[in-house]
Image (tube, helix red, strand yellow):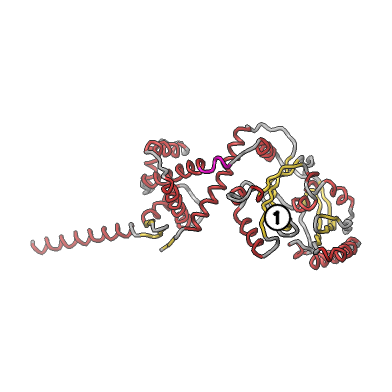
Amino acid sequence: MRAFTYMAAMVAWTLTAGTAAQAQGQLAPVITVNDQVITRYELNQRMRLLELFRTPGDLNQVARDGLIEDRLKQQEMARVGLTLSDAAIQTAMEEFAGRADMSLAQFSNVLAENNVDLVTLRDFVRVGVAWRDYIRARYNREVTVTDTDVERAIQRQGNRPTQIEVLLSEIIIAPPPEQRAQAAQAANEISQMRSYADFEAAARQVSALPSRENGGRLGWLPITNYPPQLRQMLLDLEPGEVTEPIEIPNAIALFQKRGTREGRRAVQPPVSIDYAAYYIPGGRSDDALRKAIAVKTQVDTCDDLYGIARNQPEEALDRVTVAPSEISRDVAIELARLDPGEVSYNLTRDNGQTLVFLMMCARNQAGDTDADPAAVRNQITSQRLAGLAEALLEDLRASAVIVAR
């Protein structure tokens, strides 16, 4: 009997020790963010929550990134003393469940069936709602949406069919001032070419644009992308012919026509062009070009540039909506090859001392729409606030000490 009692006690101790070790493992830190710990349990719970939400990608990495961002947000909000009341959190959780057409009780049952603690959802929702409120309070005065912003956003919602498209090759010669005469002579010689191979060889030799790497060849583009003063000139060319040298600020442009085709449907030329120009000191120096490349990786739309340019002088960013005829020829030629969301940094200003990060926002056609201006205004505001929030989070991440185990 004593032996049985001893063995039973040993088994109970072993089970208890195993459970305690397992619990201790769940509480082990896997990441620290500025000395604040993220535990194994939190990571596993976030992964289960993401799986329930059918989140794509590597759930372990997505969960880690999300938890790190949550800690950074919490620390920033704690710095300014922002908290949410229990009532506000409860309302936010009920609204979250409502998006799945469930009551909070029903959603809690779904969480339990998938081994997700309700506290995990509470933390997830609490940080998201509090951060949204913080961003609005911090940046709302910095975001101004004009009637023009609303108008061009409404115009962008229409269809964008094409009309006549042209297939061109390009050369932009950008000589220093003392070599302008030699550049003009070279441009005149190129304008007489009729061979595609000769034009491509010249592009590789003298063009200042990245397209020189493939002989200056461009893809099919609507003729309406080009400045009005160039359209007829391009349409009049025969395949193989080259334009006369076209004078643009600090450079000379030439185009060789390779083809013309009809689009599916005709469309009126754009009544206005919406574009952004972000100015980077340093001209075409390595540092300026590196910054331009970095900005390119951070922006998807023109609204994202507001976050990039925050805390900089107002003249660092221009957002312009103008008629095509009012755009300077060098900018118009650059914009011609860009689709909305695409960028270039081939131009400079201030005698080459400033690099122009140019981004196409939209080509606006005339047309009626039933869009609600108030809703569009709110959407633009939300997009710009999101850009500012993302930029702030990147700053917080860059200055944080993050250790993953």
Does 401 lie within the magenta span?
Answer: no
User: What's drawn in magenta, residue-wise?
Assistant: 138-142
**On the picture, is 353 further left or further right than 242?**
left
Front residue of 133 and 297: 133
Is residue 57 shown to the viewer in this render? Answer: yes
Q: Quadrant of the N terminus?
A: bottom left
Name the residue tied to disc 1: 356
Q: In which quarter of the image is the C terminus?
A: bottom left
Instruction: Residue 34: give x, y in percent of width and height.
Output: 42, 58
Front residue of 387 and 106: 387
Q: What kind of residue is marked 1?
A: Val
- Res 385 → quadrant: top right
Is residue 51 shown to the viewer in this render? Answer: no
Instruction: Residue 285: give x, y in percent of width and height.
Output: 68, 64
Does 140 lie within the magenta span?
Answer: yes
**On the picture, is 322 further left or further right than 21?**
right
- Examine the residues drawn in magenta and state their main secondary structure: helix
Give the tally of numbered discs: 1
Front residue of 34 and 377: 34
